[in-house]
Amino acid sequence: MKKLLVFALLITSIVLTAQDVEKDKEAIKSVIQTAYVDGLQNEGDLDKIDSGIHSGFNLLGIDKGTEMWVLSIEDWKKKTAKKKEEGKYPRIGDDLVTVKFLNVDVTGTAAVAKIEFYVGKEKKYVDYISLYKFDNGWKMVNKIYYKF
């Protein structure tokens, strides 16, 4: 009887943990959609950007050879605000950005999302977005990408 009880508790624990991971994955997708796709890419909405992108976030890119560059979220937001002032936001029609989630991997309070990034129907990038779960929820903290 004790073995059966221990087995039942173990199965219950596994099921609850799996449910928590699925909730985290959905929360991560929501953060990326709201802060990155809607806020940063399509609307230029600084409040949406701040809702899901940590102030220490950096976009990392590579140049020729072994050189890398870094764009902080603060600098990216300045560029976004300028584009909004110039009337480049909101994006519409064939300029609208959408994403397809290929994978979301969660371990505790750390996660990585792999997404395809489209402008209109054209696939432009594959993004790898790192996130941490803070007391106030999931936040994007880093991004690398591959450009097609």
Image (tube, rainbow, N blue to C red):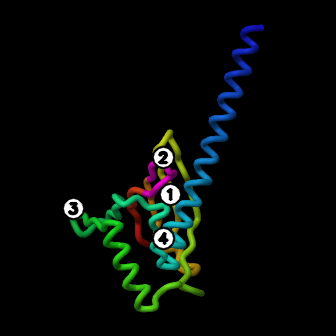
Whole-number angstrom distance, CA of label 3 to CA of label 4? 35 Å
* Disc 3 and disc 4 in contact, CB within 8 angstroms: no
Q: Looking at the picture, which amino acid does disc 2 mark?
A: Asp
Mark 2, Cα crowd under 10 Å, few <14 / some 14-19 / many 20+, is: few
Q: Looking at the picture, which amino acid does disc 3 mark?
A: Thr
Numbered tag placed on residue 47 in the rendering:
4
Whole-number angstrom distance, CA of label 1 to CA of label 2? 24 Å
Q: Which type of secondary structure does the marked residue at label 3 adopt?
A: loop
* Disc 1 and disc 3 in contact, CB within 8 angstroms: no
Which residue sits at x=40%, y=60%? 143
Q: Mark 1 points at which residue?
A: 114
Question: Is label 1 or label 3 in front?
Answer: 1
* Disc 1 and disc 2 in contact, CB within 8 angstroms: no
**Who comes first in sequence, dot 1 or dot 2?**
1
User: Residue extending furthest top?
Assistant: 1
Q: Eyeballing the image, is 103 above or below 47? A: above
Q: In which quarter of the image is the C terminus?
A: bottom left
Question: Is label 1 or label 2 in front?
Answer: 2
Question: Is label 3 or label 4 in front?
Answer: 4
Whole-number angstrom distance, CA of label 2 to CA of label 3? 37 Å
User: Residue extending furthest right?
Assistant: 1
Magenta residues span: 131-140
